[in-house]
Amino acid sequence: MDFTTDPGFAALRFAPLDPVYFSYRVISVGDGSSRLIAEGDLDEGGDTSRFTIECSAACGLRRVLIERGLGRPETHRLRVG
């Protein structure tokens, strides 16, 4: 993926030069704030992790949510903020 051509990633100036190991999404929440999501299985052990960052219209950090073991009953969640 060419991050520089995506309007959401370009606005965040997110353009990694090296290969990426997660899939990334930028979601506009509608009130001017955004949700940034990264999902992947970094060690290829079968456990998908999701990192979610919510920020305000001025990109002031509101909340971070880290989830491991998605799709399993024992999913671990850590919420900051």
Image (tube, grey):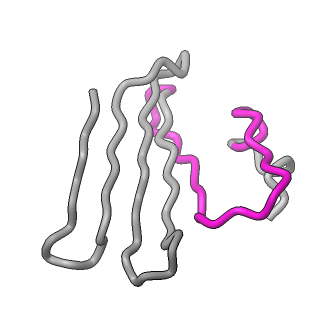
Describe residue 12's horizontal placement relative to residue 51 as left or right: right
Q: Position of residue 53 (x, y in %)?
A: 44, 39
- Name the residue located 51 percent from the left edge and 44 percent from the top edge: 36
Image position of 47 with respect to 5: above or below: below
- Name the residue located 79 percent from the left edge and 46 percent from the top edge: 15
Describe residue 50's horizontal placement relative to residue 58 as left or right: left
Image position of 11 with respect to 42: above or below: above
The image quadrant that residue 23 belongs to is: bottom right
- The number of discs equals 0
Q: Position of residue 78 (x, y in %)?
A: 24, 46
- Name the residue located 31 percent from the left edge and 57 percent from the top edge: 67
Task: Determine if the magenta segment contains residue 18.
Answer: yes
Out of 29 and 68, give the one closest to the viewer.
Answer: 68
Q: Position of residue 47 (x, y in %)?
A: 37, 76
Q: Quadrant of the N terminus?
A: bottom right
Q: Which residues are magenta?
A: 9-32
Out of 69 and 29, give the one closest to the viewer.
Answer: 69
Task: Determine if the magenta segment contains residue 39.
Answer: no
The image quadrant that residue 58 belongs to is: top right
Describe residue 66's horizontal placement relative to residue 25 as left or right: left
Q: Residue furthest left?
A: 73
Out of 51 and 25, give the one closest to the viewer.
Answer: 51
Image position of 63 with respect to 52: above or below: above
Image position of 80 with respect to 48: above or below: above
- Name the residue located 34 percent from the left edge and 31 percent from the top edge: 63
Q: Position of residue 81 (x, y in %)?
A: 27, 27
Describe residue 3's horizontal placement relative to residue 48 as left or right: right
